[in-house]
Image: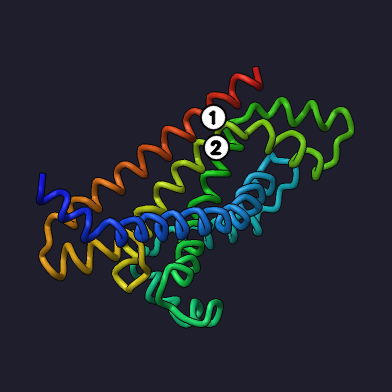
Amino acid sequence: MQAAVAFFNQYSAMLLEGIRDTLYMTFSSAALAYLIGIPLGVLLVITSKDSIRPMKAFHAILGWVINIGRSIPFIILMIAIIPFTRAIVGKYIGSTAAIVPLTVAAAPFIARLVESSLRELDFGIVEAAQSMGATNWQIIWKVLLPEAVPSLVRGFSISTITLIGYSAMAGAIGAGGLGDIAIRFGYNRYQNDVMIVTIILLILIVQVIQSLFNLLAKSIDRKNR
């Protein structure tokens, strides 16, 4: 008991800051990645064969570019785009700097999640909208995206949890957060107690996020019925 109290007194402030930085990096990069990923995912769907705006060459090139983005391991991507990160935020170390590679890594992944969510829809609703004279823009904003919201919410939980794992890896170059604490104290200083606590905290964050998004998706499903 005394050991636990001593540990809490020594590391509680640092761990709370690590939780804050982890959540800041994760949700900021998730929001930015969705701003990029949703349009890319929509373009993948609407430009595919037999869709509302087929563009074979564009669809093939876009899919190829997205696949390249998904293929690069995050730790390599993070180091490779250090000049780009420095150009955007003026530095490459710290929580704010980590948002840049996190966003770049997540956007192609999210684009594929969005594509998958939209392809799950019954194409009959698109044909019905077309028969009523809806434009392509109206079909996207008033039919496809609203109908896919429950699936998109579940995809958001997947991408957010993935970004938590990426943010932990970003600690390898001083990004801050729980990953940075685990590396600096748990790994470099052989403090197993700090390592274990950071792992437990990351697990708890993942479980809370997954539960919240599951509840939100179920609530949206009920409203749509």
Mark 1 or 2 closer to N-term? 2
At a point 82% along the width and 32% down the height, the residue shown is: 130
Front position in the image: 202 or 129 = 202
Against 117, is 99 above or below? below
The residue indicated by pointer 2 is 153
Front position in the image: 122 or 20 = 20
Q: Are marks 1 and 2 in contact (CB under 8 Å)?
A: yes
At a point 54% along the width and 40% down the height, the residue shown is: 116
Q: Which residue lies furthest to the right in this view?
A: 133
Against 106, is 42 above or below? above
Residue 188 spot, x, y in % from top left: 15, 70
Q: Which mark is residue 13?
A: none
Residue 158 spot, x, y in % from top left: 44, 43
At a point 81% along the width and 30% down the height, the residue shown is: 129
Front position in the image: 33 or 92 = 92
Is disc 1 placed on a helix, strand or loop?
Answer: helix
Q: Residue 217 carries which label?
A: 1
Quadrant occupied by the N terminus? top left
Against 7, is 132 above or below? above
Image-based side of 69 in relation to 53, left or right: left
Circle 1 residues within 10 Å: few <14, some 14–19, many ≥20: many
Distance from Cα at disc 1 to Cα at disc 2: 6 Å
Q: Which amino acid does label 2 sit on?
A: Val
Residue 109 spot, x, y in % from top left: 48, 52
Colouring rule applied to residues? rainbow
Q: Which residue lies furthest to the top in this view?
A: 225
Image-based side of 133 in relation to 33, left or right: right
Image-based side of 12 in relation to 166, left or right: left
Location of residue 95 by image quarter? bottom left
Q: What residue type is labelled 1?
A: Ala
At a point 74% along the width and 41% down the height, the residue shown is: 140
Quadrant occupied by the C terminus? top right
